[in-house]
Amino acid sequence: MFASILAHAVYALLITRQNRRANGQGYAYDRRGAASKWYSRKMGLLGTVLLVFLVIHLRDFWYQLQFGHVPLDKDGQKDLYTLVVSVYHNGWYVLIYVLCMGALGYHLLHGFFSAARTLGFYNARYVSWVKIAGWIYSIGISAGFALIPLYIHFARL
């Protein structure tokens, strides 16, 4: 998974660089706002937010589990449950987590639509179904991830 995230980021940087060098000059009249959604134009920003989030998230969970001091449960195993609950009781962490899941939703939505275009499904015959499926997919994944810290924070487990 780490390799695929890294490859995705490197590929995005290469494509962006290639697009900027394509003709050597900017647009004379820029109307990208009329032709594309804001989240499509801000993939670099959304991707950077997600990368920073992943670093923080992995530090707080994976790194702590592997190298940090994690309490042990009654069987002598590392108690990941206690670690997760203690982190998600921090309101700022939960707020940042939920906002980053919003960024993830828009990032996934753009990726879903781009993949549909690449595969030839984003045409007059299927476009309405692709849009519905893309929104369901993106909201489902991002909301599903966001519900975990929200539930733990507000249920006071």
Image: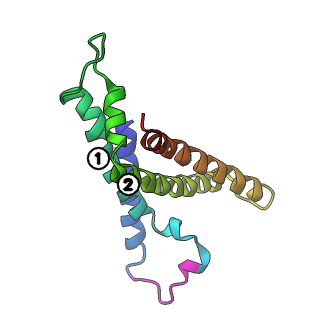
Q: In this view, does 116 lie above or below 35?
A: above
Does the magenta segment cover residue 93? no
User: Can I make out residue 3 in this image?
Assistant: yes
Side (left or right) of 84 relative to 137? left
| Residue segment shown in magenta | 25-33
Q: Residue at x 71, y 54 (%)?
A: 132
Is 122 drawn above or below residue 151 in the view shown?
A: below
Residue at 60% over, 45% down: 140
Q: Is residue 40 above or below residue 113?
A: below
The disc label shown at residue 90, or none? none
The one of 79 and 105 positioned closer to us in this rendering? 79
Q: Give the main secondary structure, helix, strand or loop, of the magenta stretch.
A: loop
Q: Which one is in front, 107 or 127?
A: 107
Quadrant (top left/top right/bottom left/bottom right) for the C terminus: top left
- Label 1: which residue? 56
Where, by quadrant of the figure, is residue 156 drawn? top left
